[in-house]
Amino acid sequence: MLQGIRIVEIEGLGPGPFAAMMLADLGADVVVVHRKSGSSAPGAPQRNPLDRGKRAIALDLKDPGDLQVVRQLVSRADGLIEGFRPGVMERLGLGPADCQALNPKLVYGRMTGWGQTGPRAQEAGHDLNYVSLSGAAWYASDAGQAPFTPPTLVGDIGGGALYLVAGMLAGIIRAGRSGQGTVVDAAIVDGSAHMMNLLMSLGASGGLSMQRGQSILDGPHWSRAYACADGGWISVQCLEPKFYATFLETLGLQQAPELASQYDPAQWPAQTAVLAAVFSAQPQAHWADLFAGTDACVAPVLSPERSAQDPHMQARGTWAQVDGLWQAAPAPRFDGQPPHSPAAAPARGQHTQDILAELAGAPRPMAP
């Protein structure tokens, strides 16, 4: 879908490389600029799964000759992705003004936790910090327990990488129409807060409370995971009355008076205790089989490895092992297009000579 689009990725951590991987999954030609000095983090593999489908070149951004190579790459690119703290790229001579002087159509993607501006812009932070400050962690976990979101998914990926991808694509469309590039300030605090809008919309119908455990999706007995007899977990989220009725009928509890009132917050704790006792009596497989094929909105909670064995996930070919590591297939999918199988992640700097040879026929840009 993005064939012919060129992206330069300056090696970083987490959401930036993920965003570049997703663009590569969509068909863009992504060149990742690896550091010559070695891996980007202690213990990092020489082949990073997030580099799949990319080409790799190893450069020293403090070396004038290598810096010219980066500028040459930038001059031929549609987009650039970087994930340093504000000001780092400017000090290298690769800030937005420097790069867009070489290539006015360039879409310059900046991936940070706190954003380019604001009191915390220069502070260190990680996924849980960003989603905590943004409000996105407030409804995570059951009331009375420590808020904790799935690692990286809500912040780094949901609020960060995916918003950077959306911003890059919007910028590339605009550049194609106007010839004018842009700078994308993708901050995890902004994206994860923006993701809350669907939940916040429940406030219009009275379904959202600022008190944990009292909202339509974070408090009810029909919207949570329950422990099973074998230590596994089963997820339940039968929001609508017709699905709740199917849920109770499948359990044989349609006549249970204690479960009759679906939307009364005062009864949710007691109703949760009833269902907890029910689900704890049988192993996860029992419940998965019982609810299979129903509209009760119930599914087992699986590890990625077990997810790969699930018939539905197998039918969609979602999971695969590559170089001994589990990886999920590119998403989304496109009608009429064969499933995309990205090339294996390259070794650090694997394509350096090929890329240099490719650039050899192009004039080298002057330093800003």
Image (cartoon, helix red, strand yellow):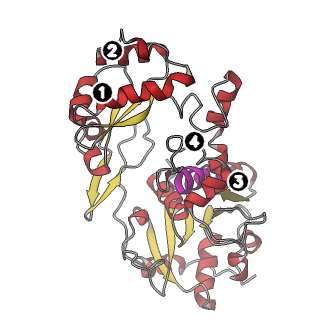
What residue did someone put label 4 on? 139
Disc 3 to disc 4, C-alpha distance: 39 Å
Q: Which residue is mark 3?
A: 175
Q: Which amino acid is tagged 4? A: Tyr
Q: Quadrant of residue 102?
A: bottom right
Q: Residue 317 colored magenta?
A: no
The range drawn in magenta is: 154-173
| Label 4: which secondary element | loop
Q: Position of residue 196 (x, y in %)?
A: 63, 41
Q: Amino acid at mark 3?
A: Ala
* Mark 1–mark 2 distance (CA, rounded to whole Å): 10 Å
Say what amino acid the circle numbered 2 marks.
Answer: Leu
Residue 221 horizontal/vertical position (percent): 45, 27
Label 1: element kind: helix
State the residue in front, 192 or 281.
Answer: 281
Towards the viewer: 100 or 38: 38
N-terminal of the pair, mark 1 or mark 2, is 2
Q: Which residue is mark 1?
A: 278
Residue at disc 3, secondary structure: helix
Determine the image quadrant of residue 299.
top left
Three-letter residue code for mark 1: Val
Q: Is residue 306 positioned above or below 250 on the image? A: below
Which of the two marks, 3 or 4, is nearer to us in this view? 4
Sequence-wise, which precedes: disc 2 or disc 3?
Answer: 3
The residue at which mark 2 appears reads as 253
Residue at 71% across, 25% down:
204
Mark 1 neighbour class, 10 Å CA radius: few under 14, some 14 to 19, many 20 or more: some
> Which residue occupies 32% across, 19% down?
294
